């Protein structure tokens, strides 16, 4: 098992940044290896058919996605799987916020690939949220 964390500061307030992350349709914009096939809301949680590309293979499955506006935290994971993640947005100034991404995966063999994907996601987040 491996745990990963990355943080960055973005040039938008915390509420705007959280609103971006709370919409799962934005996920493929910052995690470029992810593609959403369909989404369904169940009891306030979002169930998404997702496909991710890792190790040059495609992995398809149903993922859970939950956005907690009070905590400004988005969580996701695979039901019954050993994969979960979260994004937390903390207020900085009126025009900045801190974004922290955490991932937990059960496959230690993929650490270099996950590090690379997280670094790319942080760069994408900075680019996408710099003008919002």
Image: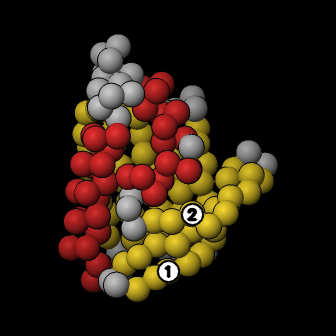
Q: CA distance from mark 1 to mark 2?
A: 12 Å
Residue 117, x across and y down, in percent: 29, 64
Toward which corner of the image does residue 115 lie, by quadrant?
Answer: bottom left
8 up-or-down from 64: above or below = above
Residue 106, x across and y down, in percent: 40, 76
Mark 2: secondary structure? strand
Answer yes or no: is residue 5 visible.
Answer: no
**Extreme-right residue of the structure:** 43
Camera-side residue of 8 and 71: 8
Residue 42, x across and y down, in percent: 77, 53
- Of badges 1 and 2, the one in the foreground is 2
Residue under the point 48% across and 25% down: 15
115 sits to left or right of 104: left
Mark 1: secondary structure? strand
- Name the N-terminal-most of marks 1 and 2: 2
* Viewport quadrant of the N terminus: bottom left
As drawn, the label of residue 36 is 2
Residue under the point 67% across and 63% down: 38
| Residue marked by disc 1 | 59
58 up-or-down from 100: above or below = below
């Amino acid at each position: 098992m491996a745990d990963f964390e990355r943080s960055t500061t973005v040039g938008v307030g915390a509420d705007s940044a959280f609103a971006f992350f709370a919409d799962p349709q934005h996920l493929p914009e910052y995690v470029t290896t992810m593609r959403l096939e369909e989404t369904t809301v169940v009891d306030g949680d979002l169930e998404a058919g997702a496909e991710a590309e890792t190790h040059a293979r495609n992995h398809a499955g149903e993922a859970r996605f939950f956005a907690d506006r009070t905590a400004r935290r988005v969580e996701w994971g695979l039901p019954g799987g050993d994969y979960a993640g979260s994004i937390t947005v903390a207020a900085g100034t009126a025009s900045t916020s801190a974004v922290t991404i955490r991932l937990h995966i059960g496959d230690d063999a993929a650490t270099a690939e996950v590090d690379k994907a997280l670094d790319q996601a942080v760069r994408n987040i900075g680019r996408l949220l710099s003008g919002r």
